[in-house]
Amino acid sequence: MNQEVVKIILQTKRDIWKNKELSDLVDDYFENSLLTLDFCTSLDACLKRAGHIESIINVALRKFQEEHYGVSEEGSVKNYTRTLEELRNFKTAGDPFTSEFFKVFNSVYAQQLLMLERLQAKKRKLDRKLRKLKAWRKVSNDIRSGFCISFDMLGGGGCRHCSTGCDGSGSCSCRATRINGQMA
């Protein structure tokens, strides 16, 4: 589990739990993290079995060298019984990656793909909302500008920023009319 993600979730938990979609997404993230942890545990067990199998192979190789290069009676045939015994142990040990490992792997893989699809859908939805907000901001700025221009044209006020009716002498309380102590 990514500690940074958990930290962000904890910092924004009130906002997350208010939004059902986001709350479901966070729940899925935690479930996905638990599945990933199960996968890592299964992988660790498989790697330990693989290490055990490697040691069996190393013992078999050592036995082979001892039997092959060892002293034997004149004219006797080398039968490599200890080497064959270790190779049988290797065969008995089997594949270190069990069917259980592949079940967990496929489950995590499917869950990761599902999570990716949900995140992409959420991103597309948020991108659409952001585009709409930008459009509304532009429209509202245009309306406000048009209103201010119309108001000034009708002689509604002296200050072009706050419409307080100041006379331009600098006595307006609007901060926008002053830049470095001068009238804008």
Image: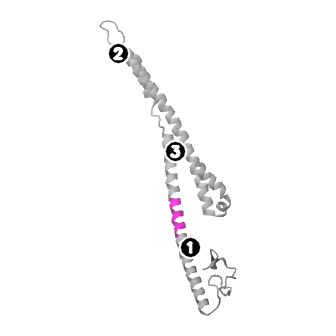
Amino acid carrying mark 2 in the image: His
**Helix, strand or loop under label 3:** helix
Dot 3 or dot 2, earlier in sequence: 2
What's the mark number on residue 68?
2
The mark closer to the camera, 3 or 2, is 2
How far apart are labels 1 and 3 at the CA level? 43 Å
Q: Which residue is mark 1?
A: 133
Mark 2 Cα shell of 10 Å, populated few (<14), some (14-19), many (≥20): some
Residues under labels 3 and 2: Cα distance?
A: 44 Å
Q: Quadrant of the C terminus?
A: bottom right
Residue 73, compared with residue 88, is above or below; it is: above
Q: Residue at x 63, y 92 (%)?
A: 155
Residue at 56% over, 73% down: 133
Which amino acid type is marked by label 1? Leu
- Res. 87 in view: yes
Mark found first going from the N terminus, 1 or 3:
3
Which residues are the magenta region?
117-129
The residue that appears at 63% across and 63% down in the rendered structure is: 20
Side of 57 where 124 appears, left or right: right
- Mark nearest the camera among 1 and 2 is 1
User: Label 3 is placed on what type of residue?
Assistant: Val
Can you give x and y, in whole percent of width and height, for residue 143 in the image?
Answer: 57, 83
Circle 3 residue: 104
Q: How is the image coloured?
A: one colour
Query: x%, y% of residue 78?
Result: 34, 13
